[in-house]
Image (spheres, coloured by chain):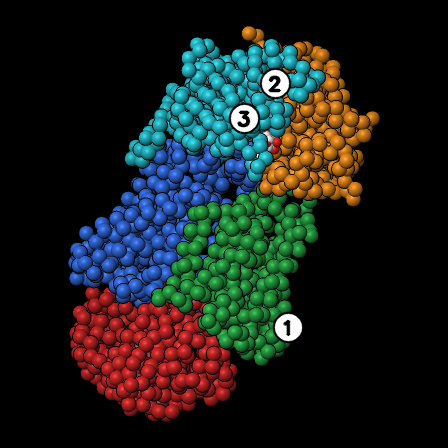
Amino acid sequence: GTAGTGSADTGSRAPIKVGLVYSKTGPLAAYGKQYLEGFKAGLAYATKGTGAVAGHPVELAEQDDAGDPAKAVSGAKDLIGKGYRVLAGSTASGVALQVGPIAAQNKVLFISGPAAADKVTGLNRYTFRSGRQSYQDIRAAASFIGKDAQGRKVTVLAQDNAFGQANVAAVKAVLGAEGATVDAVLAPPSATDLTPFAGQAKAGRPDLLFVAWAGDTAAALWTSLTQQDVFAATRVVTGLDLAASYPLFGPAGEKISFLDHYFAGAAGSNEVEVAMTDAVTKAGSKPDIFTPDGFTAAQMVVHALEAAKGSDADTDALVKALEGWSFDGVKGRLTVRAEDHALLQPMFQVKLTGTGAAARPGVVNTLPADQVAPPVTPMAG
Amino acid sequence: MTAVLKRWWPLGPLVLLLLAPYSALPLPGLLDGPLGSPGSLQLLALCLLYGALASGYDLLLGRTGLLSFGHALYFATGLYATDLAMLEFRLPFAAAALFGVACSVALALLLGSVGLRVTGIAFSMVTLAFAQAGAILVQRNPGGLTGGEEGRSAPADLLPDSLVGIQHTANLYWIALAHLLLTLAVVHWTASSPTGRVWAGIRENERRVEVLGLRPYGFKLVAFVVAGGLAGSGGVVYLLLTGGATPQAASSDATLALLVMVVLGGSGTRWGPLLGGVLYTWAAHRLGDLATSAAVAGLPAALRVPLSQPLVLLGALFVAVVYLLPGGMARLPARLRSGRTGRTGRTADTAAVPVSEGVA
Amino acid sequence: MTPLLSVRDLRVVIDGLHILHGVDLDVAPTGVTALLGRNGAGKTTTVRAIMGLVPRTGSVVLDGAEIGGLPTHRVVRRGIGYAPEDRGVFAGLTVAENLRLAERDSAPAYPLVHRLFPELKAREKQLAGTLSGGQQQMVAIGRTLLNGNRLIVADEPTKGLAPRIVTEVADVLARVAETVPVLLVEQNLALVRRVAGHCAVLADGRTAHRGDAAALLADEEAARRLLGVGRHPAPEVTP
Amino acid sequence: MTSTAPVLRLDGLGWSVRGVPIVEDVSLSVAEGEFIAFIGPNGAGKTSLFNLVSGIHPATRGTLHLDGADITAEPVHARARRGLGRTFQTSSLWPGLTVADHVRLAAQAAAGPRASYRIWRRADRYGTQVADTLERTGLADRAEAPAGSLSHGGKRKLELAVLLVAEPRLILLDEPMAGVSAEEVPALVELIRSVHRDQGRTVLMVEHHMDVLLGLADRLAVMHHGTLLALDTPAAVMADATVQQAYLGEAL
Amino acid sequence: MNTVVLLACTGLGLGALYFLVASGLSLIFGLMDVLNFAHGALLSVGAYAAWWAAGDGGMGFWLAVPFGTLVGTGAAVLLELVLIRPLYARPRDQILATVGVGLALPALLMGIWGADARPFPQPAALAGTVRLLGAVVPVNRFVLIGAALLVLLALRLFLARTRYGLIVRAGVEDRAMVTALGIDVRRAFTLVFAIGGAAAALGGALAGLYFGSVNPGQGTGLLIFAFVVVVMGGTGSVTGAAVASVAVGLVQQFANYYTAAGLGDLSVVVLLAVLLLVRPRGLTGRLA
Ligand SMILES: Nc1ncnc2c1ncn2[C@@H]1O[C@H](COP(=O)(O)OP(=O)(O)OP(=O)(O)O)[C@@H](O)[C@H]1O
Ligand SMILES: Nc1ncnc2c1ncn2[C@@H]1O[C@H](COP(=O)(O)OP(=O)(O)OP(=O)(O)O)[C@@H](O)[C@H]1O
Ligand SMILES: [Mg+2]
Ligand SMILES: [Mg+2]
C-alpha cells in the first residue's frame, strides 16, 4: 500500500520516494509501530518540519512484511520495481538478512531497523543499520562484571536457537577474551517448563548469569528463576525489552540488572530525545525501545539525501555520505562506522523499581559508545 | 463448438499469463502497480508457484486420498538443499537445483516408505511428526547450516546473472510459470495413467484394491514420491523468488496453508488446487494492504480490529468457502449449472463404506 | 377401515434426479402390508422418505396426523420402528449397546427380543460389526421390537437369512402383525404370500398396483407384468 | 470334471478370535472346474471361511494350498494375483467411481501389477473387454453412473462385473443373490452358470436360496458352528435329517 | 537425585497440562470424528477470558478461572451451532471449517490485545514452591495435576453413566440411523462439543497459570502436542490420552534436560512415529 505522507507545499520539485518494509501486522507489530512513529518523528526533525530535502518532498511508502521474509522480499521488490532507491525497515532479523542482499543486487540503499543480528553489520555496501546489534548488548552485559573479569565465572542462559547461540558465542568472545570462564545453559526453544534449567543455571554457581531470552516463555522463565531462588545466588543480567514486557518479570524485576538499548527518557533528555518524545507524544503515542531506531533511520536517510542534493539517483553517493558520519541522535552521539556500517552508540545499565504494572525503569549508568562497540567485521559484498 | 470451447478454454488464461510481463495494464485493487511491473510480477510468480504446489499436494489429497500433514517438509528440503549446495559446496545453481530436487525425492522415498506402513489418521500424524522433526531441525541451526530462525540467503554470485536483480523479475516469472505448467502436466498425466486409476481406487476403498491383486503400498509410495519431488522443485523456484531460505517454509503452518489452498479451490478437481493456491497467495499478500489501509483505520473498533488482521480475513474467507461452496470454487460452475445449491444428498449417501463393514 | 398410514403423491428428488414421482400407499391398521417391486423401483426410497431420511414432498399421514414435514427422530417418536435395508447396525458398538440405543420405552421388551433371537443374548458383548450378516439382521429387527410401536417398517428383513430363520422371521412378523401393523418391503414372494394381507407394487418410482396380496400373487398375468415373475416365487432352474 | 490335482486344498484350517474358535478344522479339496455351494445357518462361519481363503484374515491353524503352492501366509493381493477372485456379502465398491471405471480398474489389475505401474502411459480403456463385461452383467446402460447411486441389485451386479472381468480361475461368491429381485435372479443364475460351465471356472458360493443352488452345485457343503458338517452331492445332503433340522426348517 | 525428582514432578505437571488440553480434543475427536483445529483457539479464548476477568474484570483468580471456562464453553457451543452443525453431512468440511476458525480467532485476539504476552495473575497461594526430596517444585504444578485428575474422572463418569457417549459414537458411524431410532442426535453433538470446549477453556485458563502469561499463539502452540497425545492414546479413549500425556510430559522433560541438544520435542515426535508404526491404533488400540 502506498500512503503518501509528504507535505505537498514544498514546490514543484520531484518527490523523493522512501520505502519502509516493516512489520505492520504479525507478531512484531508492536515493534513495527514504534519504528514507524520514530521514523515520522525523525523525518520531521531532520527536515526541520518541512518534510522535504533540498526542496524535494519525501514521500513514504509502507510495505507490511508480517514478520515473514518472503513477504518482505516481495514488498522490497515491489518498491524497487516502482523506482524506490531508498529502503528502510526490517523489524525482524530474518527479514533484514533477506532484504539486504536484494538491496545490494539492485544497488539501492537499505537501512535495517530493530533487527539485532550481528550478521547485518558488514552484510554488504548498501546495507546500514539504525539500531543496536547483539554484540553491543553483550558488551553492555559484560560491563556488569566490573573491571576485572579474570577468573570469574559467567553462565549464559539462553534458548538453543540462532539468537541464543549467537549470544553465547558473543559472550565467549567478549568475556572469554578477558579471562572469564564462560559456559552456557541452553534450553530447547520449545521447552515450556524451565524449572530444571533454572536449577541447572543456579547449580553452576556463576558470578554472573546472563539471560538472553526472547519469546513467549519469558514470564515462565522469570517465575522459575524466582522460585529456584537464583537471585540470591548470583547476579542476573538481561536485556530490557519494550515497556509492555516489564510486568512479565514479576517480583524478579527489581533484582535483575538490566542492559538496555533504550526506554522513554533513557538518554536524559538531550535535545534530540526531547524532539522525538514531543513528536511521538503529539501523535498520541509514547516512545519505547525501538522508537529511536526509526528516528535514527530517518536522520540517516535525510542526511544521505542532503549530501546528494536531494537526488536519490546515485546510490554510491548516498553510501559515501553515510559512511563515517557522526551525529547527535536520540541516545547521544552516534557514528556510522565506515568499515562495516556498524552503528556505534551508547548503551544503558538500568534498574526496574516497582513490580507488575507499576514497574518503572531508571538509568544506573550510561555506557559510552566505544565501550560497547562491536569488533570490525570485513565487508562481505 | 461448445465441445471445442470445453476442451481448449485453458489456452485463454495461458495466453493471458504469457502476455502479462509485456503489459502495463493497471489492475487497481487487484495489484499494486501495473501488470508488468516487477512488484506485480513477483506477486504473480508467487501465486503461480503456490498454485503449482497446491496442485502437487492434491496428488496426495484429492487423487490418492492421503491426508499428509507434512508436505512442507519436502518443499523445505528442496529449498534448503539447493541453497546449502550453493553456499557450502559452491555448486553452480543448476547443479544445486538438481541436488535439491533429488534430496526431496530421496527423503520422500525414505519417509514415505516408513510412514505408509500405517493408514488413515495414523498416517497423517506420522507425516506431521516427521515434518515437525524437520522444522525443529531447521530451527535448531545444526552446525550453523540452516541459519535457524534467520535463515540463509542465496549467494548472488552463484546464481545466473539473468536471475538476479529487479530488472530480471520477468525471468523469475517465466520460471514460475514453467514450473506450474510442468506440475500440471505431471499431475494430470499421472492421474490419468494406469497408476492414477489405481490411486482413485485407493482413495475410495483401499481394501477393495487389494482384493484385485494390487498392493496399495507401492502405489501410494509412488504418489508420495512424485508429490515430494514436485514440492522439492517448488522449493527451488521459491529460493529464486525470495532469494533465500527461511524456516517459515518448513513449519506445519505451511502444510496447513497448502491444505487450505486445495480445499478453497476444490480437492480432486483438475483446476481447483491451482485456483485455490493463486487466490490464497494473492489474498495473503493483498489482505495485508487492505488491513492496513486508511479506509480500515477510519472504521469503528468493532470493525477495524478484525479487518486489520489479515489472518482474520483469510480464516473467515476460508470458512465461508467451505460453508457455502462445498467441493471448492472449481465446482461452482457445475453447481450453478445444475441450478441447485444447498442439497448434498449424494455426498452423504455415497460416503465410503468402512472396510470393517466391507468384510463383515 | 381407515388406513393407519396413508401416503399421497410422495415425490423425492436427489441431486436433481427424480427418483419418486408420486407414490400413493396405504398401510392397513392391522396385519402386514407388503411393498413390492423390482430392483430400483423405489421401495427403499419410499420407506426412507416416510421416515424423513431423504428430502421429500407430498403428504404422509399417520393416524390422522400429518408427519410429512417432521424430522426423522420426531417421526420415530410418533411410534414407528424402522429396520433399514442395509441393516443399519453400528459396527463399532456391541450388540447390547445397539439395542440400548433403540430403547425409548421405560420397559423395553427385552424378553420378547431375546426369545426370538437367543443369539443376541449370547453375543451381547460382541461388536456388531463382527456379527455374521444374518445376526446383524437380527439386531436390526430386534431394535424395532423393543418399543411399543404403532407401526413397524421393515426393508427386506429376511435378506441373507438362512431358510430356517426366514421361516422364523415370517412367524415373528405374522405374530407381531397381530398387534402392530407392519409395512414390509420384501423380495421373497413366498413369504409375502404367507404373511401379507394388502400390498402395493411400485414401478419406476410410481405406484403401479394396490390391492390384496394373495390375489395379486395368484393372478399369474398381473404378477408377471408387475413383478416379472411367473407362478413360482423363486424361479425354478431348468437344468 | 477331470480329477487332476486339486485347485484348492484346505487342511485343518481354523481361525479363532481371542481364543474363541470361529472356523474349526476345515479340510476340503476342490477340483478344477468344480462348483461347491456352502450353506449353513447364519453365523456358521461361511463368510469367515471365505475370508480365510481370500486372505482377509490370516488363518490361525492349518494350511491352504492353491495349485499346489502353500499360500497360508500370503497377503490378499498375492492370492488375488494367483487367480483368486471374490465378491463380498455386503457390497464393497468404490462409491465415487463410475460403473465403467470399476470394470476398467479391475481389468487393469488383472493384467498384473506391472501394467498398473506405468505412470508415464495413458490409461487405456480396455475397450471390448470392459464393454463385454458390462453387457454380460446388464450394466451397460448405467456405465457412467457413480456406483454409489446404484440400487441394491445394481451393486450386486457390479460386484460380479468387477470379479468377472479379471477372469479369475477360482471364484468365491458370498451370497450374490441376496436382495436381488425375483425377476433378476434367473439372469444372474445364468451368468454364474456360464462362467462355471462354459468358461470352466472353479466356483465356491455361499447362498441361502436353495432352489438356485440345487441346479448349479456339484457338491454341497454344510457349515455349522464353524465346522464342515457335511460335504456331498446336493441330493444326498438334502436328504440328511440333521441338515434339514439345523438349516432348512420348513422351506419357504 | 533431586534433579530426577524435580524432572519427574515438572514432567508430570507438563503431562497434566497436555492432558487438560488434549482431553476435550480427544472427546470431540473420538466421539464426533472432528479433528478440531479450533481447539487451540478455544483454549486461547478461555485463557484470555480468565486473564481479562482477573485483571480488568476485577474478579480475582478463583472466580476468573470458572469465568474463563464458561466463556470458552459458550464459544464452543457457538462454534458447534453455527459451523459444525450445518456441516454434519460433510465430515471433512467440518475439520476444514475448524482450521479456518483456528486461523482467525488467535489473529482476532492479537488484533484486540496485541501480539505480546500479557502477565497472568498468580494467586499468592499458588506462587510458591514445595520441597520434595530435596527438589524445589512449584506449587502450581500440583494444581495442574489435581485439575487433570478431576477432569479425567468427570469425563469417565460422563461416558460411563450417560447414554450420550453411546449416542455420539453411533452418530459418527451413521447419523441418519441414530435419528431413525428416535434420537435427536444434534443435541447430543452440541453437548459433547460444549464439554470438549469447557475442557479446552479450563486448560487455557490453567495454562495461563503454568506459563505465567497469556499470548494469542499459546493455544495453537500447545495444540500440536495435544494432537500427539490424542493419537498416541488411541482416538476417543480419555484414559489413553491421560497415559499418553504423562508419557509425553515425562519423556519431553527428561530428554530436554539430559540430551546435549535438548531433544525433548524431537524425542516426542520419534516416540509418536515409532508407536504408530508398531501400534497404528494407539495405546488403547481402539478403532478410529
Ligand atoms: N442417493 C441416490 N442418488 C442417486 N440415485 C439414487 C439414490 N438413491 C437411490 N437412487 C436411485 O433410485 C432408484 C430407486 O432406488 P431404491 O433403492 O429405492 O430401489 P429399491 O426398490 O429399494 O431397489 P432394491 O430392490 O434394489 O433395493 C434406483 O434407480 C437408484 O439407483
Ligand atoms: N472379528 C470377529 N470377532 C468375533 N466374532 C466374529 C468375528 N468375525 C466373525 N465372528 C463371528 O463368527 C461367526 C461366523 O461369522 P460369519 O460371518 O462367517 O457367518 P456366516 O456363516 O457367513 O453367516 P451369514 O449367513 O449370516 O452371513 C459369527 O457368529 C460371527 O459373529
Ligand atoms: Mg431397496
Ligand atoms: Mg456370511
Residue E172 got which mark?
none
Q: Secondary structure at mark 3?
A: strand
Which residue lies at the image location 53% right of the left edge and 32% below the top edge?
Answer: D15
Q: Colour of chain C?
A: orange
Q: Position of residue A18 (x, y in %)?
A: 29, 73
Q: Colour of chain A?
A: red
Q: Position of residue C88 (x, y in %)?
A: 62, 36
Q: Colour of chain B?
A: blue
Q: Secondary structure at mark 1?
A: helix
Q: Which residue is mark 2?
A: D209
The answer, for residue B155, to whether it is visible in the render is: yes
Rounded to the nearest angstrom, the CA distance separating label 1 from label 2 is: 70 Å
Q: Is residue D79 left or right of residue E214?
A: left
Note whether ligand 2 is within 8 Å of mark 1. Answer: no
Rounded to the nearest angstrom, the CA distance separating label 3 from label 2 is: 26 Å
Which residue lies at the image location 24% right of the left edge and 87% below the top edge?
Answer: A370
Q: Is residue D1 above or below residue A242?
A: above
State which tag comes first along the sequence, 3 or 2.
Answer: 3
Q: Which residue is mark 3?
A: D25
- CB contact under 8 Å: marks 3 and 2: no
Q: Is residue D143 left or right of residue D40?
A: left
Instruction: Give the cyan chain's letter.
Output: D
Local crowd at mark 3 within 10 Å, few (<14), some, or many (≥20)? Answer: some
